[in-house]
Structure formats: C-alpha cells, structure tokens
Amino acid sequence: MTMLTFALDDINHLQESAQVEFKLAGGRDGTGQLPEDMWETYSAFANTLGGEIILGVREDKGEFTIEGIINPMPMLSEIWEILNNPTKISHNILAPTDVQIIEIMSKKLIRLHIPAVDKSLRPIYLGQDPFSGSYFRVGDADMRASHEQVKQMRQRSGIDLTLTKRC
C-alpha cells in the first residue's frame, strides 16, 4: 500500500462543508475505530455531490486538529468489509484508489473519496431499507432522506416502485 504525503496546506485551509467531513476515529483506546456515523456521510455524499471523508482529525468548536490514527490497516480492512456487505451498504461505489492512507505532520490519516453516483444507482443507503437508510448532504450536515425524497430518487433511477414494499 502506497502512503501518500500531503502538504499541510492541503488540509489546513479545509473546513467541513457540503463536500468535506472530518472524523476523529480514535476509538475508546485511541488506537483507531471507525465512527458509526461515517456511513451516513458515505450515503449523503454519494446521493448528493460527492465528497471527502478524512479520518483522524479532531474538531472542537470549529477548530480542527490532526490527531492521526496509530494503526490504520485494521480500519482499512473493516472499511472494505462493510462496503462489500450488501446487508450494511446498498452499493460499494469506491475503487481501491478512493481509500488511501495519507500522512500529515508525521501522522497517518485515512482519506475516503466518495464520488456522487449516477442517478441510476440512487439512493445509496445503509442497511436493507432505502426508506430508513438513505441520506443526503445539506451544508456540512448529513440529513436522513424523507420517504418522498427516497421515492423521487428511485423514480429518477428507473426503479419500478410497484415492485417494492410500502413503508
């Protein structure tokens, strides 16, 4: 696995936005754990404009500090296991180059590039029910899609709604 080195300026001027989300991913013991709400951001980015999730950055009152992840390899394995489990995520839309270990200030971070998906694949959702597991991005927040919003995404994708169960 190639570790990319980014200049500090690449991240120093970033703020959370419609296309950037920072997560600490420290876990209880500080050695690293995937944040549960990261998958909501994955769904939201995929269903909206796409974006970057960067794990290993602490936010405190709008200020960001690079904490790093001591051992990122187990987290990478877990990311791929979840992405390829259709009971957890409707579609894995990431290529191997979309998930990288980057190094800033001698600290390792995980960077996930989430592309916006074509309307034919939307919605990308968590679990097995698009009506309870679909998200979209509004500003720097992940919002659960309403029943009507999910119906609209599915209609645009060409999914026959008469064949899906009513919620």
Image (cartoon, rainbow, N blue to C red):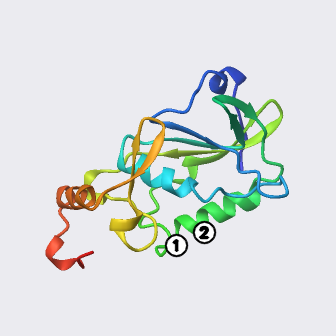
Label 1, secondary structure: give it: loop
Image quadrant assignment for residue 14 = top right
Q: Nearer the viewer, residue 126 or 96?
A: 126
Q: Where is residue 103 in the image (x, y as percent from the top left)?
A: 75, 36
Picture disc at residue 85: 1
Residue 50 percent location from the top left of the image: 42, 42
| 34 vs 9: above or below | below
Residue at 74% over, 32% down: 65
Pick the front one: 112 or 2: 112
Position of residue 37 relative to residue 160, above or below, is above
Amino acid under label 2? Glu
For mark 2, what is the residue?
81
Q: Position of residue 70 (x, y in %)?
A: 83, 49
Q: Which of 54 and 1 is in front in this view?
A: 54
Q: Position of residue 132 (x, y in %)?
A: 38, 66
Local packing at callout 1 (Cα closer than 10 Å; few below 14, some 14-19, many 20+) is few
User: Is 52 on the left or on the right of 167, as rendered?
Assistant: right
From the viewer's perspective, tell me whether residue 78 is left or right of residue 15.
right
Dot 2 falls on a residue whose secondary structure is: helix
Q: In which quarter of the image is the C terminus?
A: bottom left
Badge 2 vs badge 1, beta-carbon distance below 8 Å: yes
Q: Residues within 10 Å of mark 2 (few under 14, many from 20)?
A: few
**In the rendering, which numbered label is found on residue 116?**
none
- Tell me what residue is drawn at x 33 percent, y 59 percent: 123
Amino acid on which disc 1 is placed: Asn
User: Which residue is at a point 57% across and 28% down the rendered structure image?
Assistant: 15
Q: How many labels does the image show?
A: 2
**From the viewer's perspective, is 119 left or right of 100?**
left
Question: Which residue extends farthest front?
Answer: 61
Mark 2 → mark 1, Cα distance in angstroms: 6 Å
